[in-house]
Amino acid sequence: MMRSLLKTDYLLIETLRGLRRGGWMNWAAASTMTVLLFLFGTSLQVSWQVEGLLNQFGSQLVISTYLESGVDAGSLITQVQRLPGVVDVSSVSKEQAWSQLTADLGLSNISNAAAQLNGNPLVDELKVKARDAEQVPRLADTLRNMTGVDDVLYVNEVIKQLRELNEGLRWVSLCIVSLLSMTAIAVVTTTIRLIAIARRQEIEVMQLVGATRSWIYLPFLLQGVTFGLVGAGSSWGLLLAIQEGLKSLATSNQPAFIEFLINGLRLTAQQWIMLPIALLALGSSLGLLGSLIAVKKVAAAR
């Protein structure tokens, strides 16, 4: 137990000593990590917002299913309700639709209008709500192929544009995060390498007394992970500060764009857990990778 504590103390002390020798390079590595992880966290939130809109459209979008002439809507409700992905089904009789149409057109004499058209020309309709956006096209095709259904209409273009927007944002975010990740790895590699070069005499002494290579270079790996953890904590703090700032604007008459941002940056209970974990995982992984590259270069130069 005592030996393990001594080893832990040694690693912590050596890690702090190395960070002190890094000087301003520590600031460069940590700030680069912060910017990278902040943009990564923002892109995650935007992606979650667009996916939420897609799900919202999928759950609230009404698929209008028009039946063939003479087919009663009540005869198909039970069959439609059993379809996978259906949340709710409501029927609109042709009489209800006719009354609504004449009211919208401002016709006061309904019987006269019906007589001019040789009766009610409308058909019964089923309004079907889907569970999510992904199931809407498939559900519409299923309804269209059912016996007694004449036509199916739904706002496919809105969902299609939202999907394309989400895919475009993902690709842009992936490109930006990838470029910044390479920059962060390069900065961490340079920082750790400079620290190792500054301590080359201490490393030589440790090698002479029989210290293993893994034990010598482990503090440098911990320094790289520290840069990632600091960047993750800083970026998480910035994201929280922006959320609180936007929430403070909710009490005033803010424009629709600000309201959209406020709703978009509002995290669910699950996302409150996922976002900081993702930031910590990405930051520590990039820091560890950068320090590994630096250690290999230093070891190869020796």
Image: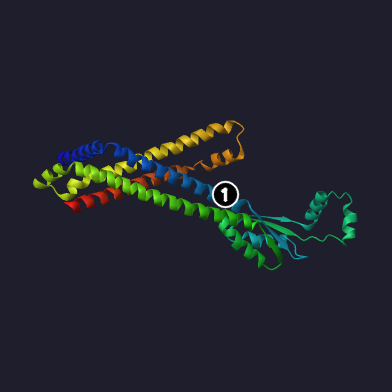
Q: Quadrant of residue 279?
A: top left
Q: Secondary structure at mark 1?
A: helix
Nearest to the observer: residue 91 or residue 212: 212
Query: Tag 1: residue type?
Result: Leu
Q: State the image coordinates of residue 285 (x, y, percent, origin top left).
A: 33, 49
Residue drawn at the location 87% of the way across and 61% of the way down: 117
Nearest to the observer: residue 261 or residue 104: 261
Figure disc tally:
1
Residue drawn at the location 30% of the way across and 50% of the way down: 289
Q: Quadrant of residue 19?
A: top left
Is there any visible trace of residue 234 in the rendered image?
yes
In the rendered image, which quarter contains the N terminus? top left
Q: State the image coordinates of residue 147 (x, y, percent, origin top left).
A: 69, 68
Nearest to the observer: residue 293 or residue 280: 293
Vertical relation: 150 (above or below) 59: below
Is there any visible trace of residue 132 in the rendered image?
no
Q: State the image coordinates of residue 71 (x, y, percent, origin top left).
A: 75, 64
Vertical relation: 170 (above or below) 42: below
Q: State the image coordinates of residue 205 (x, y, percent, origin top left).
A: 11, 43
Q: Which residue is mark 1?
A: 53
Q: For mark 1, does the 10 Å Cα neighbourhood hold few (<14), some (14 to 19), or many (20 or more) residues?
A: some
